[in-house]
Amino acid sequence: MLSRFIYKNEQWRVWVVNASFKSMKSSFSIQNWRRRWLAACRQTSLKYLFPFLILISFVTVLLVDSFTPAIVEGGRFSAIAQIPRQEIRGVWMTNNDFDTLKNRAKVQDAVSQLRRLNFNTIYPVVWNSGYVMYPSALAQRAGIQPFVYRGSDGHDILADLITQAHRQGLLVIPWFEFGFMAPPTSELALNYPDWFTQKRDGSQTSISAAGEVMWLNPFHPQVQQFITNLVLETITQYDADGIQFDDHTSLPYEFGYDKYTVDLYTQETNNAPPSNPQDADWVKWRADKITAFMVQLNQAVKQRKPQAIFSISPNYYDFAYKFQLQDWLTWMRQNIVDELIVQVYRPNLQSFIANISRPEIQEAQQIIPTGIGIMTGLRNNPVPMQQIKSQVRAVQERGLGVTFFYYESLWNDAQESLEERQAGFQNLFPSPALRARVE
């Protein structure tokens, strides 16, 4: 893609230069130009003329380089340089957005609004609370889907969203929100108890933003195969542009003391797992196992759909590794990550800026599209537009993209009016930043 862009850009520059000279030819005949040149040479020593010619050449190069090819998009001009930049301007669609997602007309309106406000990517949830958000033969065979999420007229919600988004030029990257996490009341937890891990004291749950949850054992081959199959089903069954895994494709550091994992660790190290769950070697062993699975998962995705974007949206690295055994920096360095969005949900601007300025984020943005996850509000905790603006500006100043959590809170669950919120987002993104689909 980049090489093609450079080639096209060079073609543009050649065209500009040629056009400039053609214009000159229309005003001055070649013969007239030659006569003037010879006269100048006779009247002026070449040693005085040479610096002048160098100056003209330098100015010409500057003028040519200053041209930026433009395309017309929706009645506006936008720089073609925006295309290879691949700036992320996304929004997550969660279970809280289900009233919108199940209605075709509302989806059409939502996608049109996002396009008008110069967004370019939608991340709809497809794995949450131990259930998939689409008709899944795999989930039904596993006995974990007694019902199927469908739209108000019985249609496939995910298929409809993808179709409408693609018509408007937006990418759709389904989001495996819960990762290895599932509620203890889910069919998954009830039907497959051996798939779940535990703490050293034998307890199996932790408290998360989603309430009390259990954790699938990421080291268990059956769990790995189950998640892999769901991911492959999603990218095969739908014309999705990729797949995303967030901070729950991980394991809280307290877990990993189930029989399967203890036996595996003992077999490989000739030692029992340390009693301290934050022991450095024990942390690294488990993190490395998750990394190995993510490498395999990436390979499976790319074999099935080579152009699929393998996206991750973790917490900042120190927290992700130490507390969630999620070594996403190594994933990136092993070239299995196509896109990174770091969740930074901080109301304090100083703390927010400190987190988005971390060296691992700077490293990432040199090689892959990189963005920051920004909180735009919760049902009972709206975020003021001024806070959103200041955070987006800080992100943009560092050359990063942005993804908002979540759609309904952009302007429906807010303190300001609908018009004020939408005007605010319009000001954040005054011109398009297209993301090209790879067919």
Image (cartoon, rainbow, N blue to C red):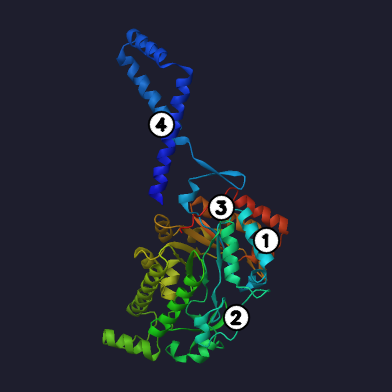
Q: Look at mark 1 in the image and give the residue it sits on.
A: 109
Q: Give yes or no for contact between labels 2 and 4 (Cβ–Cβ under 8 Å).
A: no
**Identity, as a three-letter code, of the amino acid under mark 3:** Arg
Q: CA distance from mark 3 to mark 4?
A: 33 Å
- N-term mark: 4 or 1: 4
Image coordinates of residue 318 in percent, x first then y, are 42, 68
Residue 271 in view in this figure:
no
- N-term mark: 3 or 4: 4
**Identity, as a three-letter code, of the amino acid under mark 1:** Asp
Q: Is residue 336 above or below residue 200?
A: above
Disc 4, SS: helix
Q: CA distance from mark 2 to mark 4?
A: 61 Å
Q: CA distance from mark 4 to mark 1?
A: 46 Å
Q: Look at mark 3 in the image and give the residue it sits on.
A: 393
**Identity, as a three-letter code, of the amino acid under mark 4:** Val
Q: Look at mark 2 in the image and give the residue it sits on.
A: 148
Bin the neighbour count of mark 4 within 10 Å (Cα to Cα): few under 14, some 14-19, many 20 and up.
few
Image coordinates of residue 19 in percent, x first then y, are 46, 29
Badge number at residue 61: 4
Q: Is residue 122 above or below residue 226?
A: above
Looking at the rendered image, the disc whose residue lies closer to the viewer, 3 or 1, is 1
Looking at the rendered image, the disc whose residue lies closer to the viewer, 3 or 4, is 4
Disc 3, SS: helix
Looking at the rendered image, the disc whose residue lies closer to the viewer, 2 or 3, is 2
Looking at the rendered image, the disc whose residue lies closer to the viewer, 2 or 4, is 2
Q: CA distance from mark 2 to mark 3?
A: 41 Å
Q: Is residue 65 above or below residue 302?
A: above
Left or right side of 103 for 80: left
- N-term mark: 3 or 1: 1
Left or right side of 327 for 404: right
